[in-house]
Amino acid sequence: MIFRATADGHIDLDDRLVRCALGKAGVIAAADKREGDNKSPIGVWMIREILYRPDIYPDGPTTALPVRPIAPDDGWCDAPGDAAYNRPVKLPYPASAERLWRDDHVYDLVGILAHNDDPPVPGLGSAIFLHLAREDYSGTEGCVALARADLEALLAVARPGDAVGIGV
């Protein structure tokens, strides 16, 4: 199944459209995606794995997808020149890395999307996630963000091999 996110900020969830947030600067062809451009890459991206905060989801999220709890020292490398670019790392990390355990809770539940990961090409975008939206649905740095209830509903029906389609 492909969960289709439209460029106008909606995602098809089980035959109903729900609101989502995309990149602050809109969407862009995947080949033109660049690190830090605040654009969501157009394409179909398999949901590889679900990360979650065990203090928020003690039993883990309800999903058939692979899951892994995160810890306070988990991060994601976004430094194009680093060997761990677009990969999970432990913090502190010597290169630039985004903290996954956040005070704003947008990463309480995260789907790792298969953008620029097999293998990662330096500079073509990292950390393209499916995650929780801010209350005002403000734009992301390139991710797809949904309300907690909607993300939980998506994960409950998602199966291995399912994907998020951005702008397709």
Image (cartoon, rainbow, N blue to C red):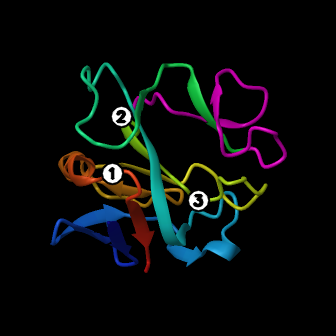
Tell me whether the residue at label 3 lies in contact with that at label 2, contact meaning CB atoms closer than 8 angstroms. Answer: no
Q: Considering only order in the chain, which callout, 1 or 3, is on the residue closer to the N terminus?
A: 3
Quarter in which the C terminus is drawn? bottom left
For label 2, the SS is loop
Query: Relative to 61, does residue 132 appear above or below in the rendering?
Result: below
Instruction: Name the residue type under label 2.
Output: Asp
For label 3, the SS is loop
User: What is the magenta segment's predominant secondary structure?
Assistant: loop
| Number of other residues with Cα within 10 Å of mark 3, as a class: few under 14, some 14 to 19, many 20 or more | many
x 31%, y 63%: residue: 20
x 41%, y 57%: residue: 161
Q: Considering only order in the chain, which callout, 2 or 3, is on the residue closer to the N terminus?
A: 2
Query: Relative to 24, does residue 31 appear above or below in the rendering?
Result: below
Which of discs 3 and 2 lies nearer the camera? The answer is 3
Which residue has dot 3 on it?
115
Q: CA distance from mark 3 to mark 2?
A: 20 Å
Q: Kindly indicate the quadrant of the structure image that contains residue 152.
A: top left
Which residue has dot 1 on it?
133
Which residue has dot 2 on it?
108
Q: Does the magenta-highlighted stretch encompass residue 36?
A: no
Q: Kindly indicate the quadrant of the structure image that contains residue 5.
A: bottom left
For label 1, the SS is loop
Task: Give the magenta-colored segment's residue range.
Answer: 79-104
